[in-house]
Image: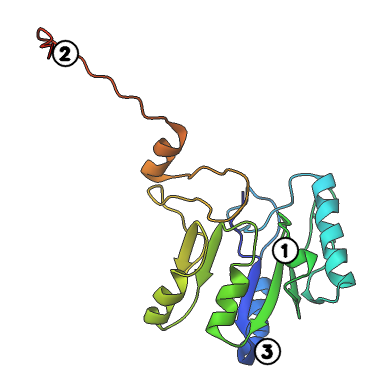
Amino acid sequence: MCTNGTRVFVPAKCKAAFEQKILARVERIRAGDVFDPQTNFGPLVSFPHRDNVLRYIAKGKEEGARVLCGGDVLKGDGFDNGAWVAPTVFTDCRDEMTIVREEIFGPVMSLLTYESEDEVIRRANDTDYGLAAGIVTADLNRAHRVIHQLEAGICWINTWGESPAEMPVGRLQTLPALVARNGVMTLQSYTQVKSIQVEMAKFQSIF
């Protein structure tokens, strides 16, 4: 299962500024040949999957989300033969929208605004997945207070997506069984305990 940061909660007062920063970041994306070291964005795995992602994008538009950028296939030189979808950011999203509630497995991000800490914790936990969560803030006390209330198997503070080998990745919601990956937890997830005792001396019966 993926841990993409596709559902992003932004303080309502920061919405306009955040949208501009996201657009600036999207402009830095370089799509192309994945064997080129300068490329940081490739095509999807297949054309059927591309079409499925495009259906999600169409559903987002239909349900009232506003396309901030992208929203279609990539066009132009080099994009004719691959299953390309442009990096897409939706804004003015609501919790009940399909693009917010379901995993798309494509380059689609949904921006949602919030007013209070309690509100955003409740809404962030309102998911069937519980795979990943992250917080970006200069207030580390607040970061730790909030991160411990988020029901997600792997969490980040002031970063996203880094997963060293010793850091387990699990899930804390109702998604069907997903064993922990990485670290010693992997061995514990894939093994069963069986105890065996061997007595090398003469057995001393109590009878």
Q: Which of marks 1 and 2 is nearer the N terminus?
A: 1
The image position of residue 37, as x and y in percent, is 58, 54
Q: Amino acid under label 1?
A: Arg
x 65%, y 77%: residue: 22
The colouring scheme, among rainbow, by chain, secondary structure or one colour, is rainbow
User: Is disc 1 surrounded by few (<14), some (14 to 19) or many (20+) residues within 10 Å?
Assistant: some
137 relative to 101 in the view: left or right: left
- The reply to whether callout 1 and callout 3 are in contact (CB within 8 Å) is no
Residue where numbered disc 1 is placed:
101
Task: Choose the circle earlier in sequence order: 2 or 3.
Answer: 3
**Which SS class for mark 1?**
helix
Amino acid type of disc 2? Glu
Disc 2 and disc 3 in contact, CB within 8 angstroms: no
3D distance between C-alphas at marks 1 and 3: 23 Å
Callout 2: SS = loop
In the displayed image of the protein, which residue is found farthest to the front?
207
Numbered circle sitting on residue 16 = 3
Question: Which residue, given by chain and number where applicable, does mark 2 sit on?
Answer: 199
**Rendered view: 11 above or below 96:** below
Left of 193 or right of it: where is 113? Answer: right
Q: Along the polypeptide, which appears first: circle 1 or circle 3?
A: 3
* Structural distance between the alpha carbons of marks 1 and 2: 57 Å
Q: Nearer the viewer, residue 161 or 77?
A: 161
